[in-house]
Structure formats: structure tokens, C-alpha cells
Amino acid sequence: ESIKVYMNSEKPQSRKAKFYQSKTLIIDYKDINFLKKFISPSASIDSPRKTGANPKHQRELSKAIKRARHLALISYIPS
């Protein structure tokens, strides 16, 4: 295997969560379109590595998705 060496301009940028870009840190279980961005095609909650969220926001995000599923706003299975 080869070792990847990055120059400063080629270094991959760190991922920022989508709610950091919009400057709104309100994670609401009623905002279905926002929550669907963090659900994979297999209907599982994306990992913090993929979402770019810190632990506090990842917990809030997971809690909001689980609440929305419980209230049948989001399906448990892929559609």
C-alpha cells in the first residue's frame, strides 16, 4: 500500500455539520426535511464521522430523529 502525502492545498477539509453552515443550531423533531439529511438510504442514523457533528449535537440529532420516528413523521424502514 502506498502512503498518502498531502500538500497544504490538497489536504481534505474537515467536515462541518449542515446545521453549522446555516448558523441555526435548533434541531427540531418537526423539521422532517432537515432530519432526512442525516439518515442513510438504509434508514439508519448517520454516524458523527459522516455528519461532522460534535457529541452534543449528535445526541440532539439522534434524539430528534427517534422522536420523529416514534410520532410516525419518519419511517423506521427505507422507503
Image (cartoon, rainbow, N blue to C red):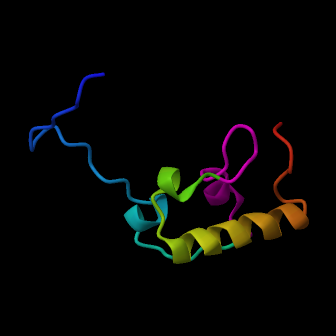
Quarter residue 77 falls in: top right
Residue at image location 49% in from the left, 54% down from the top: 49
Any magenta on residue 75? no
Q: Which range of residues does the magenta coloring cover?
A: 29-45
1 sits left or right of 70 in the view: left
Any magenta on residue 31? yes
Q: Nearer the viewer, residue 60 or 49?
A: 49
Give how far across and how far down residue 39 sits, in percent: 67, 49
Magenta: main secondary structure = loop
Residue at image location 30% in from the left, 22% down from the top: 1
Give how far across and how far down residue 51 sits, in percent: 51, 55
As drawn, which residue projects farthest toward the left?
8
As drawn, which residue projects farthest toward the top?
1
Q: Is residue 9 above or below residue 75?
A: above
Q: Nearer the viewer, residue 47 or 23?
A: 47
Give how far across and how far down residue 42 sits, in percent: 74, 38
Q: Quadrant of the C terminus?
A: top right
Q: Nearer the viewer, residue 22 or 76?
A: 76
Residue at image location 57% in from the left, 68% down from the top: 58
As drawn, which residue projects farthest toward the front?
1
